[in-house]
Image (tube, rainbow, N blue to C red):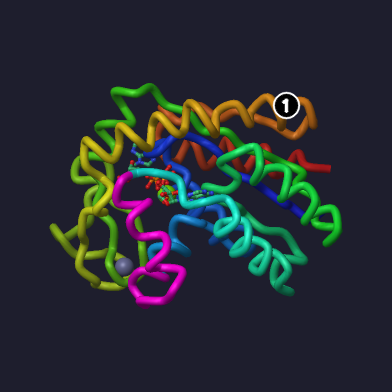
Amino acid sequence: MKTNIILMGPPGAGKGTLAKRLISKYHIPHISTGDMFRDAIKAGTELGKTAKDYMTRGDLVPDEVTIGIVRERLAQDDCGHGYLLDGFPRTLKQAEALKELTTSLKREVNLVINIDANQAELIKRISGRRVCKNCGAPYHVTNMPPKKEGICDQCGGPLFQRPDDNEAALKVRLSHYYADTKPLLNYYEAMHVLSNVNGMLGADEVLNLASKLIGEVK
Ligand code: AP5
Ligand code: MG
Ligand code: ZN
């Protein structure tokens, strides 16, 4: 069975952490719009120049830009055997564009995993998060520390704090989540593809619950 999955949840809920674990288990492409924008900023492309200021403030990158990059990515051959979207869609316009696109590609979404955690926990996770500069692996100073401080376990790269992981930008990111993205849960519930996983649990438990949901996809 093809698993065409969306991971949804507020900033810091653990989407990226779960995604990295799922893709090494299921070998499907991880499509994170946030990572695509960060890569574009690093490479200095036009896309990166467009996205940078929005991201630094915590605002959403305009729909037409974001929909454009997902349209290109989902049409690639490697998405024909399943895919894992992380951080897309985030607005109703994006969800409607995704519906149209996946229908025309015959790659319809068949599972939406919503991971949530309370706001105090989200703030703790975001403020303690460190990310590998080379491979993007996420760590946390207390929850998931690397074996050697400041160094990625997987590739030896240096760890850094994302520029949008500060109090002011997080406030904006959370407000967009509650106003623009959370309402999409109703949209997917009505399509009978929504399942919830308690993101307050430890990362191993979250992985087990998500894997169980994937195993149940018919
Ligand atoms: P994006 O990169 O998607 O950021 P986000 O949604 O704010 O989510 P995060 O990546 O911050 O959190 P996460 O849920 O992945 O948590 P993680 O696993 O790292 O987007 C960034 C920006 O790009 C947006 O603000 C916007 O500007 C732009 N953008 C992206 N997509 C867009 C779109 N579709 N439309 C418009 N604009 C878009 O975990 C967090 C921390 O917690 C880590 O330290 C981790 O180690 C720890 N942790 C994770 N799981 C657990 C656990 N179970 N228990 C304990 N600790 C845990
Ligand atoms: Mg993420
Ligand atoms: Zn690394």
Relative placement, left or right, of 75 versus 61 is right
Please give the name of the residue rendered at 69% of the width and 31% of the height, measured from the top-left corner.
194
| Residue with the most extreme left position | 149
Q: Position of residue 122 (x, y in %)?
A: 33, 31
Q: Is residue 184 above or below residue 26?
A: above
Which secondary structure is most common in the magenta stretch? helix
Q: Which residues are magenta?
A: 40-57
Q: Position of residue 60 (x, y in %)?
A: 45, 46
**How busy is the neighbourhood of tag 1: few (under 14 within 10 Å), some, or many (20 plus)?**
few
- Identify which residue, 12 or 18, lies in the foreground: 12
Residue 80, quarter of picture: bottom right
Q: Position of residue 34 (x, y in %)?
A: 45, 55
- Identify which residue, 157 or 66, lies in the foreground: 66
Q: Is residue 91 above or below residue 107?
A: above
Q: What residue is shown with label 1?
A: 189
Q: Is residue 108 above or below residue 197?
A: below
Q: Position of residue 162 (x, y in %)?
A: 26, 54
Which amino acid is tagged 1?
Glu
Relative placement, left or right, of 176 versus 82 is left
Please give the name of the residue rendered at 54% of the width and 61% of the height, measured from the top-left corner.
24
